Amino acid sequence: MGKGSTGTRGRPTVKAGGQATIQQSGQMSYAENYERCCLESAGAIERAFMRLMTRKAEKIGQASHKIWSLKYLIDHYFAGRSGLRVLDCGAWNGWFLSYDVPEIAHRIALDFDPYYAGELGRSGIRFVLADMEKGALPLAASSIDLLAMTSTLEHLSCPEHVALEIRRVLKPGGIAFVTVPNILKYGFRFWDDVTHKRPFNGKSLRFLFETHGLETVQLCPYNHNLFIAGNLFPGPVHRFLMQLRGKALMYIGRKPGP
């Protein structure tokens, strides 16, 4: 997946047949075209699974299956806490921030492309326009409880800088949740997305964050649908399925502190 990479900032016009022309800026809007160009179509089993998870979400007063990643992290790492500040770096359309509960005081979507800013604002999500490869994140030090970066780090040419900024903005004891493709599983298919810049394996991902001040809590294979299915299966079954089917990597790290 590609969200949060640098480069394209124009606004194309999409013609019949799905082709996009480029306006005066000479650049194409990444967010506007990502789903059309890059996302794989969901199969019948995936669609059935999404319907099931949507029904489960509706039973707890939420809108869709998109809530389960954030809910999982809140339940496992912030149980009983309130006033939480959650930041999604490379937020794209804000799917990760869909979980809307009183315990989360601020949901913040950061991206270099403002295409979804209005839609996010109408959903109660604050949009921050920023390029993660250029300078500091426009957020105060020690201000974020949970920082997510899903399928974004591989699009950035300076992961060391990003890792430093993640540590800076996290509160002591704050959690970073990062997912990337595993180059050992993807192989040359990693480069099918022309915006991919930096491949990772488990060792390099751990090295990156531990050398920039985070403590590793969990590092394991990752599959998005199986991750959110953790709400359906017992823990051991969930971990087995992730090991079996995960072609990406999930890193959960903690900033040292109380």
Image: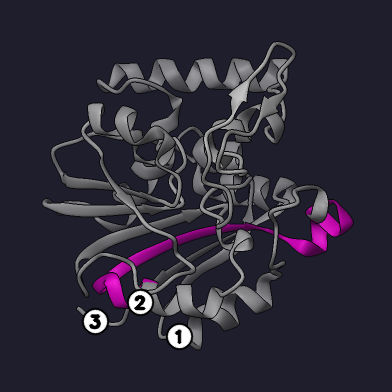
What residue is shown at x 72% (from left), y 30% (from top)? 40
Horizontal and vertical percent for residue 54? 44, 19
Horizontal and vertical percent for residue 181? 69, 56
Mark 1 residue element? loop
The reply to whether dot 1 and dot 2 touch (C-beta < 8 Å) is yes
Q: Residue furthest bottom?
A: 211
1 vs 3, front mark: 1
Which residue in the structure is indicated by mark 3?
A: 257
Q: Residue furthest right?
A: 188
- Amino acid type of the residue that numbered disc 2 sits on in the rendered structure: Arg
3 vs 2, front mark: 2
Which quadrant: the C terminus?
bottom left
- Label 3: how many Cα within 10 Å (few below 14, some 14–19, many 20+): few
Give the label on residue 226, or none.
none
The answer to whether residue 256 is above or below residue 29 is below
Mark 3 residue element? loop
What residue is shown at x 49% (from left), y 32% (from top)? 232
Residues in magenta? 166-190
Horizontal and vertical percent for residue 194? 75, 51
How many numbered circles are shown?
3
Which quadrant: the N terminus?
top right
Which residue in the structure is indicated by mark 1?
A: 212
What residue is shown at x 81% (from left), y 57% (from top)? 185
The answer to whether residue 250 is above or below residue 47 is below
Asked whether residue 233 is in view, the answer is no
Determine if the magenta segment contains residue 180: yes
- Amino acid type of the residue that numbered disc 1 sits on in the rendered structure: His
User: If you read the primary sequence from the N terminus, does the residue marked by circle 1 or circle 2 appear first?
Assistant: 2
- Amino acid type of the residue that numbered disc 3 sits on in the rendered structure: Gly
What residue is shown at x 67% (from left), y 33% (from top)? 39
